[in-house]
């Protein structure tokens, strides 16, 4: 291709990729497939390789291209990045409103209410429409140059729809799902966990190597323009619309309010709804809409007089660490759980909180008997934040992790490079039970009617001791178990039978091979198509798959070399469990309809981690119906503690009973 033609094509590709990127990441409304997008991108990379002079800094290929930095350079902000003064109740807001009305001699002010995103403030500069700078807030005057890291944020256009120069301010944040994914990954390799999405976002933005930042899918909402850039606009609403038009992502939930009562309704609404957002918010920002009024009001040394941040009440409470309980997981990892003096937190009683691993106990300096601050992370899961050392009496005692497995008494080990203590006895009952629970779970073989409780019961009554045993269960044996009616037995056997037809990736994931998650299993199943081919695969074969790294490959080969695994697969085959890839998609909660959708629920008893109302709301969001009385039409009874007649009735009718733990596991 001639240079002139290449140049023209590169420009056209820039434009197309810019628009598709905006449709996908800003508008959430793509019009081409990922594969088509990749095709355009590949063509651009190809042309840039052939004609390196056509590769510009704003090229879509340049999001993650930069080399690691030795340190971050300082940047002076064009205008100071201020913070906001806070309001903690309605009175504070009324006072704010009255002060403004008085100063302006007006009896009504128009405000714009926005969500206060819990992330990090960033300043972003475009010159002639091209992204040139991303900076942290720093001390407000001077921040750090994090241009390369901000560039990895997909919703940030590297080029604006208009070739203008301006500086915008916004909040970079980590979506809740991404936060969970990162922590899950860190937990799997024994790295310490991020306490909240905000810390994780800060950690990502401060990576000196942009490749590491790019691995964390940060996102960005733009909430305003820097002083000079907003010249020419008369209201905040107008600015917001202009920002969106340029291709930048604005949070869509902003709303105009003409009184503090209207502001308060907005606050109340979001206080209830915040847990349903895909990102964390820590309050509501209220801003005067009219720029002329803003100019009159001006600033204090630290913050504008025309805006205020209402902070949601902290969902924290003080409790006492009464004990630390240990649970042996599927892979033998010992997880400590804090047993707390019951305390009411955001409307529910909290009695337990996961401590993840021994290092966290040490890092937080926890002693048994300590007064601790407890908070609800992600609105559901309780977490121990810190010790209140000033409350110590000297009676507190140190906690020591055991040297032996609390379940099978074999010696615990700490594998190289891992934080977690593990029981490595393959015959450990706790691990076997957890392994079977994983096998039947929704993400794996999806045996809907076989919950955790039933698995434990079957194991304890010695009807099963491995996953293969599930396929050899006899009706009579099941019927002989206590609290097991004919209907439940029918349902259980049906679920087991149905699972035999699952596509290979579910079985592969269900085996619980270390480092093989559902995504990895899917890629491997897709690639090799049969279990036999996977069993025979070498590490080298496995490494040809993009998702598979050396750790996973090594773990798979070692797993299939074990004679007991060969025997297990033989028994599964004999039971006619499908061992081929059928091309079906792995069902993930986020990607498809939840298995509770369309199901009829009744909730009874006291739940530990939430109110019945909250549980009902959660279920309704997932598409389930919640009714008051148990009947034949009821699919599930969610039974908390002290469940009474509804539980008895459900048992008589053979309605499936979910306890809180199983419920939480399903909805997470
Ligand atoms: S406006 C003059 N709007 O909250 C200050 N801030 O102290 C303009 N924040 O660190 C800030 N969401 O980064 C504004 N919708 C929003 C916001 C928001 C989050 C952060 C901001 C700053 C802090 C306020």
Image (spheres, rainbow, N blue to C red):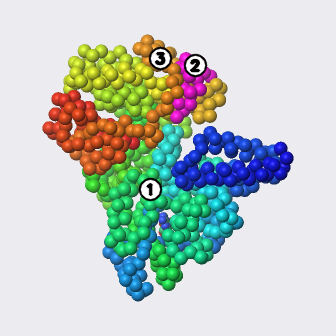
- Residue at image coords 40%, 18%: 468
Q: Nearer the viewer, residue 385 or 410?
A: 385
How far apart are labels 3 and 1 at the CA level?
44 Å
- Residue at image coords 34%, 57%: 272
Q: Dot 1, how many residues are within 10 Å of its Cα: few (below 14), some (14-19), or many (20+)? A: many
Q: Mark 1: which secondary structure?
A: loop
Residue assigned mark 2: 533
* Mark nearer the N terminus (3 vs 2): 2
Residue assigned mark 1: 280
Residue assigned mark 3: 569
Tell me if 579 is positioned left or right of 160 in this view.
left
* Residue labelled 2 has its Cβ within 8 Å of some atom of ligand 1: no
Q: Mark 3: which secondary structure?
A: helix
Q: Quadrant of the C terminus?
A: top left
Q: Is residue 511 above or below residue 57?
A: above
Instruction: Point out residue 493 in the picture as x, y percentages from the top left corner.
Output: 32, 21
Where, by quadrant of the figure, is residue 36 drawn?
top right
How far apart are labels 3 and 2 at the CA level?
13 Å
- Residue at image coords 51%, 20%: 580
Tell me if 611 is positioned left or right of 364 in this view.
left
Q: Is most of the magenta stretch helix, strand or loop?
A: helix
Instruction: Point out residue 198 in the picture as x, y percentages from the top left corner.
Output: 49, 56
| Magenta region includes residue 72 | no
Tell me if 533 is positioned left or right of 509 in this view.
right
The residue range painted magenta reads 519-538
How far apart are labels 2 and 1 at the CA level?
44 Å
Q: Nearer the viewer, residue 184 or 169?
A: 169
User: In this rendering, which labeled residue sits more in front, label 3 or label 2?
Assistant: 2
| Magenta region includes residue 521 | yes
Where, by quadrant of the figure, is residue 489 drawn?
top left
Q: Dot 3, how many residues are within 10 Å of its Cα: few (below 14), some (14-19), or many (20+)? A: some
Q: Quadrant of the N terminus?
A: top right
């Amino acid at each position: 291709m001639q240079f002139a033609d290449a140049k023209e094509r590169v420009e056209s590709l820039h434009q197309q990729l810019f628009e598709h990127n905006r449709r996908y990441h800003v508008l959430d409304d793509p019009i081409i497939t990922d594969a088509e997008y990749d095709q355009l991108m590949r063509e651009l990379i190809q042309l840039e390789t052939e004609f390196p002079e056509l590769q510009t800094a704003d090229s879509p290929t340049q999001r993650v291209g930069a080399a690691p930095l030795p340190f971050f350079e300082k940047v002076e902000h064009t205008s100071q990045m201020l913070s906001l003064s806070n309001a903690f109740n309605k009175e504070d807001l009324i006072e704010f409103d009255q002060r403004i009305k008085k100063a302006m001699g007006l009896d009504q002010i128009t405000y714009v209410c926005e969500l206060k995103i819990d992330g990090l403030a960033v300043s972003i500069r475009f010159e002639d429409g091209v992204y040139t700078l991303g900076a942290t807030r720093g001390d407000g005057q001077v921040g750090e140059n994090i241009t390369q890291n901000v560039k990895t944020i997909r919703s940030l256009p590297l080029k604006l729809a208009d070739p203008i120069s301006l500086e915008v301010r916004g909040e970079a944040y980590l979506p809740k799902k991404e936060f969970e994914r990162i922590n899950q990954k860190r937990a799997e390799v024994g790295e310490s966990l991020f306490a909240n999405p905000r810390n994780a976002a800060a950690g990502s933005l401060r990576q000196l190597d942009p490749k590491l930042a790019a691995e964390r899918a940060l996102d960005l909402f733009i909430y305003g323009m820097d002083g000079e850039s907003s010249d020419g606009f008369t209201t905040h609403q107008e600015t917001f619309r202009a920002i969106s038009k340029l291709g930048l992502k604005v949070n869509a939930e902003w709303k105009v309010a003409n009184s503090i009562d209207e502001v308060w309704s907005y606050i109340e609404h979001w206080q209830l709804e915040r847990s349903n957002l895909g990102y964390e918010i820590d309050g509501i920002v209220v801003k005067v809409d009219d720029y002329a009024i803003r100019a009159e009001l001006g600033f204090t040394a630290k913050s504008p007089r025309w805006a205020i941040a209402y902070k949601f009440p902290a969902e924290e409470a003080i409790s006492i660490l009464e004990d630390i309980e240990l649970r042996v997981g599927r892979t033998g990892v010992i997880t400590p759980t804090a047993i707390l003096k019951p305390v009411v937190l955001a409307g529910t009683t909290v009695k337990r909180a996961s401590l993840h691993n021994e290092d966290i106990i040490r890092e937080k300096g926890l002693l048994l008997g300590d007064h601790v601050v407890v908070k609800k992370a992600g609105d559901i899961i309780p977490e121990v934040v810190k010790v209140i050392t000033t409350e110590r009496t000297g009676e507190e005692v140190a906690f020591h992790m055991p040297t032996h497995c609390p379940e099978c008494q074999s010696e615990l080990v700490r594998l190289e490079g891992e934080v977690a203590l593990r029981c490595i006895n393959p015959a450990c009952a706790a691990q076997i039970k957890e392994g079977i629970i994983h096998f039947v779970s929704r993400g794996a073989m999806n045996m809907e009617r076989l919950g955790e409780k039933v698995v434990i019961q079957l194991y304890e009554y010695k009807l099963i001791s491995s996953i293969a045993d599930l396929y050899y269960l006899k009706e009579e044996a099941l019927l002989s178990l206590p609290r097991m009616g004919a209907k439940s037995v029918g349902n259980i056997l049906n679920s087991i039978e149905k699972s035999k037809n699952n596509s290979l990736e579910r079985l592969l994931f269900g085996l619980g091979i270390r480092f093989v998650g559902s995504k990895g299993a899917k890629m491997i199943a897709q690639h090799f198509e049969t279990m036999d081919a996977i069993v025979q695969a070498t590490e080298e074969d496995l490494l040809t798959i993009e998702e598979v790294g050396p750790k996973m490959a090594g773990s798979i080969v070692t797993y299939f070399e074990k004679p007991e695994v060969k025997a297990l697969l033989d028994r599964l085959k004999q039971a006619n469990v499908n061992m081929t890839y059928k091309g079906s998609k792995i069902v993930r909660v986020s990607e498809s309809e939840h298995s509770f959708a369309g199901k009829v629920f009744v909730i009874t008893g006291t739940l530990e981690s939430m109110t019945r109302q909250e549980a009902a709301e959660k279920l309704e969001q997932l598409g389930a119906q919640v009714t008051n009385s148990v009947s034949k039409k009821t699919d599930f009874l969610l039974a908390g503690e002290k469940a009474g007649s509804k539980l008895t009735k459900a048992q008589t009718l053979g309605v499936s009973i979910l306890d809180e733990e199983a419920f939480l596991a399903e909805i997470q």
